Image: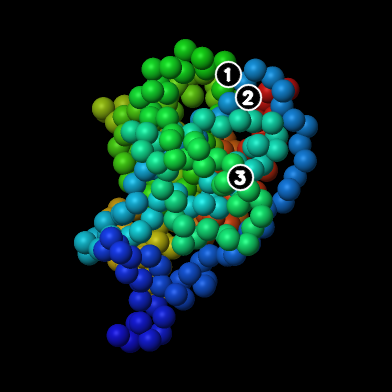
Amino acid sequence: MLKKILGIAPQLEPDGSYKPSKLALKLGTVSKTDYQNTTYPKYTGKRSKILVIFTEEKNMIMKNGKAFSTGNHPIEALLPMLHLQNAGFDFEIATPTGKPVVFEMWAFPNEDEYVSKIFKQLQPQLQKPLSLTDFINNSFTKSENYAAVFIPGGHGAMIGIPENENVGKILHWANENELFTVTLCHGPGSLLSTTLNGEKFLYEGYKMAVFPDSVDKQTPLIGYLPGHMPWGLSEKLKNLGAILMNTKSDTTVCADRKLITGASPLASNELGKLAALTILKELK
C-alpha cells in the first residue's frame, strides 16, 4: 500500500503481468525522443535490405515469479531504423515463429512525429512478420541482397531469442557473409544464440556496449521491474569473453569489426547514426 501511495508499485496489467510504476515511467520514459533527422548519401546498390529480428514474447518471469510486461523497446527499435531508412535501406521484419511483433507500448514516445510515422508505416510488417524459418529457407542463398541484421532491445529480447537456434544460424550466416550485426541494450542477449549446440561464442574478444546488470538490479527499487531479473545479461556476455565498454545505462555506442552495439535506450539515436554511417562507408 505504501508503495502505491509513493507511486513506486509496479502497475498490474489485465493479463496479470506488471508494467513499471508511475514513478518509473516518469523517470524512465519520454514523450519525445532525441532523434536527429540526419541526411545521408542514400545507398542505391544491391545490398539494400536489413533483416530486423523482433521478439514476439510479452512477459518475462522475474525471480519472484511475477511477470514483467515487456517486448521490444519502441525507441530502441524505431530510432535506429529511422536512420537506416534515411540512409536508403529497406527492412524485412521477422519474429521467431511469425507471430506479431510485441512492443513495450508503455514506453512509446507519443509526441514524437518521426517515431509515430515509421511505426505506422511498418504496421503491415509488424503485424505479419516473416518467421525465421521462412527467412532461412528463402533468403540464405541471397546474402548479396543484405547489408545487416538488426536486433532491437527491450527486455523482451531476452525471451526466446537467446535460446533460438534459428537466431544463431542467422548470426553465423551474417558473419560468414560479412554482413553487419546491429543491436543494443538487452538486444545483445541474441548473441548468446551463437553458443547453442556447444558452439564457441562467435563474439569472443569483441568490444560491445550492453545494458548493465548493475542497473537492472537497482530498478526494482522504483518499481520499474516487479522483481529481480531471472539472469544477468552483461555477466553472461563478459564470462564468454566479450569486452564490455560501458558500466552505466548511457549513450555509449561501439563498433568492432562487423558488430555495432549500444548501451541503452539513451544510445538509440547515436547507434542509428553510427550504424548508418558505418554501413554506408563499407558499401561505397
Do the numbered discs 1 and 2 sit on residues whose CB atoms are within 8 Å?
yes
- Seen at 36% across and 71% down, the residue is 11
- Depicted 177 relative to depicted 11: above or below: above
Viewer-side label of 3, 1: 3
Q: Which mark is residue 123?
A: none
Q: Which of 253/117 is in front?
A: 117
- Depicted 228 relative to depicted 204: above or below: below
Q: Amino acid at mark 2?
A: Ser
**Residue 181 placement (x, y as % from top left):** 52, 33
Q: Earlier in the sequence, mark 3 or mark 2?
A: 2
Q: Earlier in the sequence, mark 1 or mark 2?
A: 2
Q: Which mark is residue 48?
A: 2
Q: Amino acid at mark 1?
A: Asn
Q: CA distance from mark 1 to mark 2?
A: 6 Å
Q: Earlier in the sequence, mark 3 or mark 1?
A: 3
State the residue position of label 1.
145
- Seen at 32% across and 69% down, the residue is 12
Residue 245 visible (yes or no): no
Q: CA distance from mark 3 to mark 1?
A: 22 Å
In the figure, is residue 103 to the left or right of 133? Answer: right
Q: Residues within 10 Å of mark 3 (few under 14, many from 20)?
A: some
Q: Residues within 10 Å of mark 2 (few under 14, many from 20)?
A: many
Q: Which mark is residue 118?
A: 3
Name the quadrant of the C terminus: top right
**Residue 107 placement (x, y as % from top left):** 50, 60
In the figure, is residue 191 to the left or right of 83? Answer: left
Quadrant for residue 167, please give it: top left
